[in-house]
Amino acid sequence: MPRTPPPSPGAQKEKAAPPHPHPLAAFTRLAPTAYLYTPAPCTSTTSTNPNPTTTTTTSHQPPALILLATWYAAAPAHIAKYAAQYRALYPRTPQLLLTSTLADATWRPRGAQERGLRDVVGVARGVVAEAEAERGCRGRGGKSGGIVVHAFSNGGALTACAFARAWRGGECAGEEREGAGKAKKAGGSRSRSNTALPLRALLLDSTPGRPSIRRGAAALAAAFGGLTRILLLAALYPAFALLYLLTRLPRVSDPITRVRQELLDDSLFARAAPRCYFFSGEDEMVGWEDVVAHAGEARGLRCGLGAGGVGVREVRFEGSGHVRHAVVGAERYWEAVRGVVGGVE
């Protein structure tokens, strides 16, 4: 009777090796660019992570929701590291992940961005309402929980602004107004919240910049290398030059300028909520001086509001590139996050 040969060592090793889970396996996909993480029921508000840079004890209500608006072409493994740090800080808080696409950063209309997020906003509203009801608290930010918005790069800031507009109720385009009129005639109705996000804190990593042909092209080509990057840059430079010329026309503004304005819009992001800017002089895609200037504008708008707490914080890093500050200085980075998110009165 022939004997079955034993499996080769390579086959045994391959069989024994467990499959690597996807970095975002803990998230549920809500839409092509939206994912939700729902934590398991927990009765403790104390984090027990042994890493000293992420250990914290929250003496106030944790956030009701953490929104991570990532940079363009962010790798899932990189995104997962930020999500894991937030889980260590706030293990009971759900997380909403919004990824940034090339279409959103370039040619996709603002109205289309909002429409694409409406269902996601509906889910987020339910998550926040459930968290607030469970904790027996109401209000706008502070100890009532609220939403922490953490945006990365101009792409993430653009996505965060689109989400805030969709939460507020959106800006109806002509066809939407016409559709609303038809619905009204038919006896239907369309509800609009017209309320700003219940903002707990706003954290801006490597954003917002200013319009720049060189920086804009570099940002969009950053995900590629070699010949592909060279060819893409060759195509992007004239495209950005054309966009720059178009923005010189009346009633036409570029996306980056709009993002800078919307991040200061009290109807989208409450000015009284604390915020923190992370940046470095080595960032080749977003100039540190542009970030600092925006922080100064935010600080000026808070004057007269009587807003206490940590206000507007700037954290400058040395030797870190674009959206690499948490890699170079993890302890400073997450200490600032804890201070801002936990500093709301």
Image: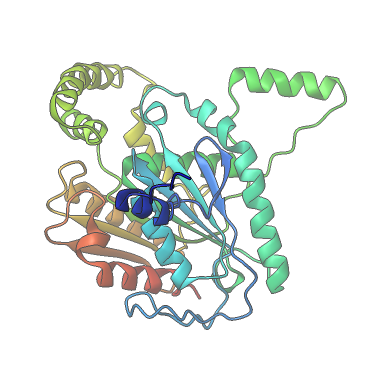
In the rendered image, residue 41, in percent from the top left (x then y), is placed at: 65, 70
Task: Give the quarter of the image for residue 185.
Answer: top right
Image side of residue 295 versus residue 121, left or right = left
Asked if residue 269 is positioned above or below residue 210 in the image, the reply reads: below
Q: Residue at 59%, 30% (x, y): give it.
A: 115
Image side of residue 14 versus residue 30, left or right = left
Image side of residue 195 versus residue 185, left or right = left
Asked if residue 181 is positioned above or below residue 301 in the image, the reply reads: above
Q: Can residue 304 be seen in this view?
A: no
Q: Nearer the viewer, residue 152 or 288?
A: 152
* Residue furthest right as drawn: 187
Asked if residue 104 is positioned above or below residue 185 in the image, the reply reads: below
Image side of residue 166 versus residue 237, left or right = right
Task: Give the quarter of the image for residue 55.
Answer: bottom left
Task: Give the quarter of the image for residue 136.
Answer: bottom right
Q: Residue at 32%, 41% (x, y): give it.
A: 154
Asked if residue 110 is positioned above or below residue 328 in the image, the reply reads: above
Q: Nearer the viewer, residue 67 or 199?
A: 67
In the rendered image, residue 46, in percent from the top left (x then y), is placed at: 51, 82
